[in-house]
Image: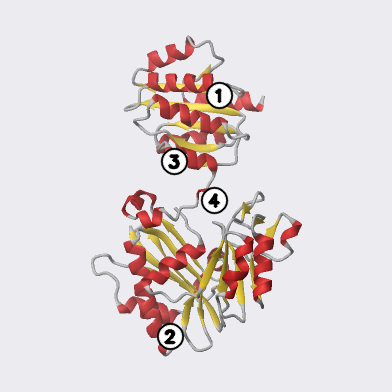
Amino acid sequence: MNIHEYQAKALLRGFGAPVSDGRVVLRAEDAKTAAGEMDGPLWVVKAQIHAGGRGKGSFLEPEAGEKGGVRLARSVSEAAEFARQMLGRTLVTEQTGPAGKVVNRIYIEDGSDIARELYLALLIDRSTSRISFVASTEGGMSIEDVAHATPEKILTFSVDPASGLSDFHGRRIAFSLGLTGNSVKQCVALVKTLYKAFVEKDMDMLEINPLIVTPAGDLKCLDSKMSFDGNALYRHPDVAALRDETEEDPKELAASKFDLNYIALDGEIGCMVNGAGLAMATMDIIKLYGAEPANFLDVGGGATKEKVTEAFKIITSDPKVKGILVNIFGGIMRCDVIAEGVLAAVKEVGLKVPLVVRLEGTNVELGKEIIRNSGLDVIAGDNLSDAAQKIVKAVKG
């Protein structure tokens, strides 16, 4: 689960990390009051969406002005005007895609004097199952671009969970960033703070970009991104309450409410499969035969008729879907349950695109019989390869 910058900074502030004073604005008429509560003389007005590259982004609506989603204001009135221009408008960045995201929140923050911009992040290293630090002197830039152009400017290391974090780790980061004097002590303290927050809140990723050094040599977290382990949210109701459903794909949101593993993609063939590995194989074979999957959808091993019905409805709600492939191997899952769920969904939402169903495993003959006797125009697949070729042919033809 992702959260907004202003929410991430509130969490950091609670752990004692250095962040600027700021106010969130949901209505344009509140922007002037929010900006007036801060000292100035410089205010930073930031669009709040779950995507990076806001400063270089552009708005689809001309009313939002020509500047990006991060603007510097030199008066309370200008800060309020920038907020008015951005609220309710669609911001397009490299990470949003051409459709962009609607800005429903604005964060107005005190401006900061910047001597240097650095990069610092914590994430889970899947290869070692450890928390890793990533640090670079090239702050304010996409870390992917830095890794591609100047990888020698990136420091990466993991923390051994047996010995835990020590001052040595903080000093190692400080020296790699070229910090001196009191900045080194601040870096050691900040590294401890970030690590504590990361562990206690079950984060997947914590990124500070940029981490700035002020002319006085103080460190400050100027921007922050956080994502959390969804499987651990039950332990953190305060974090779960920060979820902004307007930032999520409506189909993925609907799927999560029925405990379905769904990810929207850009292809034309909708997939409904049980098991993540089989779902990946199904997407691969669709690509092999010349088409693109429209989604990843794993209904799980213990899906009910109702869950299968909802899964089918989610797939058909995607206007890009030109055909549907149901690929079920009935181990724990019974093929007759899948067949009944598919037919119930078809009767409820209708069938306007080709549908290929491949069933194998527990109660497979009963499942096939249910589909054969349904009277619906459903194409049977004898095996995965046959089913994939048939749906691709039906869509392409």
- Of the two numbered discs 1 and 4 on the same chain, state the one appearing first in sequence: 4
Badge 1 marks a residue whose secondary structure is: helix
**Residue annotated with mark 1:** 349
**Residue annotated with mark 4:** 247
Task: Give coordinates of residue 55: x percent, y percent.
Answer: 63, 66
Task: Give coordinates of residue 350: x percent, y percent.
Answer: 57, 21
Q: Amino acid at mark 1?
A: Val
Residue at (57%, 83%) from the top-left corner? 113
**Residue annotated with mark 3:** 256
* Image quarter (top left, top right, bottom left or bottom right) of the C terminus: top right
Q: Is residue 56 visible?
A: no
The residues tagged by marks 2 and 1 sit, at their Cα atoms, a distance apart of 62 Å
Foreground tag (2 vs 1) = 1
- Of the two numbered discs 3 and 2 on the same chain, state the one appearing first in sequence: 2
The residues tagged by marks 3 and 1 sit, at their Cα atoms, a distance apart of 20 Å
- Of the two numbered discs 4 and 3 on the same chain, state the one appearing first in sequence: 4
Judge the density around disc 4: few (<14), some (14-19), many (≥20) Cα neighbours within 10 Å. Answer: some
